[in-house]
Image: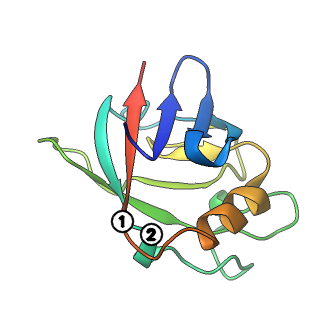
Amino acid sequence: MADLEYSISDERLSWPAKGQSWEAVSGPFGNGALPVGEYLVKRNRVTSFTDAIGPSFRDPSGQGFFLPLEPQFKTTRSGFGIHPDGGVPGTLGCIGLKGGTKSFYDTLAGAPFQDLTLEVKN
């Protein structure tokens, strides 16, 4: 079982072992939603929770972060991540948190400093 799970149809990012979930969106811009499959969550490459990040990656408080995702399958797409869904609602294929961004970031900060796994499902 993956550490994190994202359901495209339910628009929900879950961390079962932590008993947490967050409303989130993927797509519809660019090439659409994040492709279904397994990803490494690059925990050691997350940015700070800061206002010194692009407006598309900020929550309503003006703070944001970017957490890179690495597909574990062949794809021509790249640049995936998890971040607050700032600006125009929707993403270019990342997972955009619609709320609870500080809660997600704090949960991540409390996790061991190692890669995590993510399963994306329809």
Label 2 to label 1: alpha-carbon separation: 5 Å
Contact flag, marks 2 and 1 (Cβ < 8 Å): yes
Residue 23 point in image, percent of width and height:
71, 35
Amino acid type at circle 1 is Asp
Residue 91 found in image quarter: top right
Q: Which mark is residue 115?
A: 1
Residue 55 found in image quarter: bottom right
Residue that extends furthest to the right in the rendered view of this protein: 61
The residue shown at (64%, 37%) is 24
Residue 76 point in image, percent of width and height:
16, 44
Horizontal side of 1 relative to 64 (left or right) equals left
The residue shown at (59%, 38%) is 14
Amino acid type at circle 2 is Arg
Q: Earlier in the sequence, mark 2 or mark 1?
A: 2
Horizontal side of 54 relative to 36 (left or right) equals right
Residue 9 point in image, percent of width and height:
54, 17
The residue shown at (36%, 65%) is 115
The kind of secondary structure element at disc 2 is helix
The residue shown at (11%, 41%) is 74
Residue that extends furthest to the left in the rendered view of this protein: 74
Give the position of the N terminus as an image quadrant: top left
Residue that extends furthest to the front in the rendered view of this protein: 17
**102 or 33, which is in the foreground?**
102
The kind of secondary structure element at disc 1 is loop
Give the position of the C terminus as an image quadrant: top left
Query: Does residue 35 appear in this view?
Result: yes
Location of mark 2 (residue): 43
Q: Is residue 71 above or below residue 64?
A: above
Query: Does residue 27 appear in this view?
Result: no
